[in-house]
Image: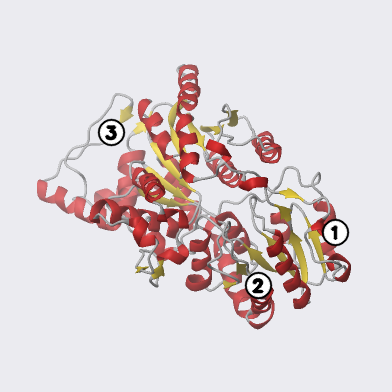
């Protein structure tokens, strides 16, 4: 007996009163209609909304069945338009999500629209490499005309203005897709999957009368925080900028402990225009048909349960979505790095890497170097030069790291560590020689560290990284802190003493505790993606939405 038949039998036998009183049909859909009394309808609505906190409850399964399985479209092919946010991390996550979807449904195809906001040859070559290596018969990439940030500034205002400017380009591309797909053998346009920073593209989806799904590339906990702050602003008339600039603690849904909002939320929210834009995005999240989150229930169970609410779209935790294979590693020298790691003892190397946009001023670089040398622990350090003048660009490798390192550092530590430029992060974290990770706590890096079971020393720098670091250190206990209130662009320098203290906690005094906790979570992350696992099941629910 099929799963669908089982579900229908279950409905007839056990849930006869939980059908809405009327369901409208359209000519291209098969529909089962059952009439019940107003009292029964009211009971259904009450039970349905309360049950949405549990994504696999009978009522949610029933709702999914009614909406997506009994209203079957006659065409078996569907196409989704993916609109990732500009930036390597957002593009990589979106591409991996697209691969998961088409891998589970042979009738589904995906068109990824690639936005580029910079002339950086490095950033663009990475995007081109991802597109070339991921294109298949059912995943294709269309590069949109380049848009420039105002004054080259990476502020949220200029970023969102650039996304707004892309609307006309997206509209033109999708119109062409819709026209070319009008034949009976062509896939129908089934909807948009928009990045968390591309919520304005919901307007374009509405113009084509197709649903939008949000792809949230950060944590469910941060999603809940955004929605909570947005509700405080719009429903309670709370001045969020003033709140973020205060010493107040806030009880966030999804967190066990009250949070110091000034310390852990993005500092940009202190500006009224920024906070209005940022929380305006969160308000638009509520307009989508569903929210797909790159997390897994076992990692953020409290947050996932908190976000399920009768005023929100259904949540689909389908992660961890990881890019486990690189496209240009050999060209960038990963072979030499892996060979060096091969010569090190198991779990002896401390890996320092701060994301695709991570870099430090010269005085901070020297403090890190002093801490590493004094700790005597083996290290692999990804060190890169900041873009000139604060420009929004990918940091470059130093031609000669000696220009920023303490005199004689490379010679004195030749047998202790290795300083590199770009790092093949996934390969490094997967290597058995790595025993700790000094990280900025970007969400992709966080998921990778958990997947490979490598404990973290948290050094967040910008955006929601402080929030992620708080969850790792205080909520999950899989990380130690180096400095939680560091902000990139501030004139604060983290001292060598602070850095060394964090390194020793990670690699010595708290080593066994953190290693065991992250090992257990690593096992849960892998089980979540297996058949029958939470994320595997949630992806199946997600696919039913586009049937």
Relative to the observer, which residue lies in front, 387 or 108? 387
At x 67%, y 38%, the residue is: 120
Tell me if residue 279 comes above or below residue 441 in the rendering.
above
Tell me if residue 270 comes above or below residue 87 in the rendering.
below
SS for dot 2: loop
Tell me if mark 3 has few (under 14), some (14-19) or many (20+) residues whose alpha carbon lies within 10 angstroms of its own: some
Label 3 vs label 1, nearer the camera: 1
Q: How is the image coloured?
A: secondary structure
Q: What residue does disc 3 label?
A: 31
Mark 3 in CB contact with mark 2 (< 8 angstroms): no
Task: Calculate the distance from the C-alpha at mark 3 to the C-alpha at mark 1.
Answer: 61 Å
Circle nearer the N terminus (3, 2):
3
Tell me if mark 1 has few (under 14), some (14-19) or many (20+) residues whose alpha carbon lies within 10 angstroms of its own: few
Q: What residue does disc 2 label?
A: 495
SS for dot 3: loop
Quarter assignment of residue 52: bottom left
Circle nearer the N terminus (3, 1):
3
At x 39%, y 45%, the residue is: 277
SS for dot 1: helix
Task: Calculate the distance from the C-alpha at mark 2 to the C-alpha at mark 1.
Answer: 32 Å
Q: What residue does disc 1 label?
A: 339
Relative to the observer, which residue lies in front, 26 or 465? 465
Tell me if mark 2 has few (under 14), some (14-19) or many (20+) residues whose alpha carbon lies within 10 angstroms of its own: some
């Amino acid at each position: 007996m099929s799963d669908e038949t089982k579900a229908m039998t279950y409905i007839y036998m056990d849930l006869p009163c939980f059908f809405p009183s009327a369901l409208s049909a359209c000519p291209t859909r098969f529909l089962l209609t059952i009439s019940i009394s107003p009292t029964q309808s009211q009971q259904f609505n009450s039970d349905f909304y309360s049950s949405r906190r549990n994504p696999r409850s009978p009522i949610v399964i029933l709702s999914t069945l009614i909406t997506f399985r009994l209203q079957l479209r006659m065409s078996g092919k569907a196409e989704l338009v993916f609109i990732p946010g500009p930036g390597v991390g957002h593009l990589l996550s979106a591409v991996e999500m697209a691969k998961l979807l088409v891998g589970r449904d042979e009738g589904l195809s995906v068109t990824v629209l690639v936005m580029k906001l910079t002339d950086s040859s490095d950033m663009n070559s990475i995007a081109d490499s991802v597109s070339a290596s991921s294109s298949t018969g059912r995943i294709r990439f269309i590069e949109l005309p380049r848009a420039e940030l105002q004054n080259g500034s990476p502020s949220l205002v200029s970023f969102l203005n650039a996304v707004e400017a892309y609307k006309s380009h997206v509209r033109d591309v999708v119109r062409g897709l819709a026209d070319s797909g009008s034949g009976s053998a062509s896939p129908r346009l089934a909807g948009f999957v928009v990045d968390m920073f591309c919520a304005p593209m919901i307007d374009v989806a509405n113009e084509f009368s197709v649903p939008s799904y949000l792809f949230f590339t950060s944590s469910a906990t941060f999603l809940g925080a955004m929605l909570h702050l947005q509700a405080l602003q719009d429903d309670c008339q709370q001045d969020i900028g003033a709140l973020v600039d205060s010493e107040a603690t806030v009880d966030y849904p999804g967190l066990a402990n009250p949070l110091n909002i000034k310390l852990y939320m993005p500092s940009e929210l202190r500006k009224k225009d920024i906070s209005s834009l940022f929380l305006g995005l969160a308000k638009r999240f509520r307009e989508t048909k569903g929210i797909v989150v790159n997390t897994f229930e076992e990692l953020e169970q409290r947050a996932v349960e908190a976000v399920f609410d009768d005023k929100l779209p259904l949540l689909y935790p389908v992660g961890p979505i990881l890019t486990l294979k690189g496209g240009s590693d050999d060209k960038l020298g990963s072979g030499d790095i892996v060979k060096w790691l091969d010569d090190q003892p198991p779990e002896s190397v401390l890996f320092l890497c701060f994301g695709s946009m991570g870099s430090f001023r010269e005085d901070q670089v020297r403090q890190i170097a002093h801490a590493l040398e004094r700790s005597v622990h083996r290290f692999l350090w990804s060190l890169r030069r900041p873009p000139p003048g604060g420009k929004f660009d990918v940091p470059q490798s130093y031609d000669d790291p000696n220009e920023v390192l303490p005199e004689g550092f490379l010679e004195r530590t030749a047998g202790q560590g290795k300083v590199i430029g770009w790092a093949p992060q996934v390969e490094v974290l997967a290597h058995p020689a790595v025993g700790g990770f000094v990280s900025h706590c970007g969400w992709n890096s966080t998921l990778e560290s958990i997947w490979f079971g490598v404990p973290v020393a948290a050094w967040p720098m910008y955006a929601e990284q402080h929030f992620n670091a708080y969850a790792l250190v205080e909520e999950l206990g899989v990380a130690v802190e180096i400095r939680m209130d560091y902000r990139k662009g501030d004139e604060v320098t983290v001292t060598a003493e602070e850095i060394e203290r964090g390194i020793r906690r990670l690699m010595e005094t708290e080593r066994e505790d953190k290693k065991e906790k992250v090992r257990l979570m690593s096992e849960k992350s892998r089980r979540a993606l297996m058949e029958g696992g939470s994320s595997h099941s949630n992806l199946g629910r997600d696919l039913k939405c586009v049937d």
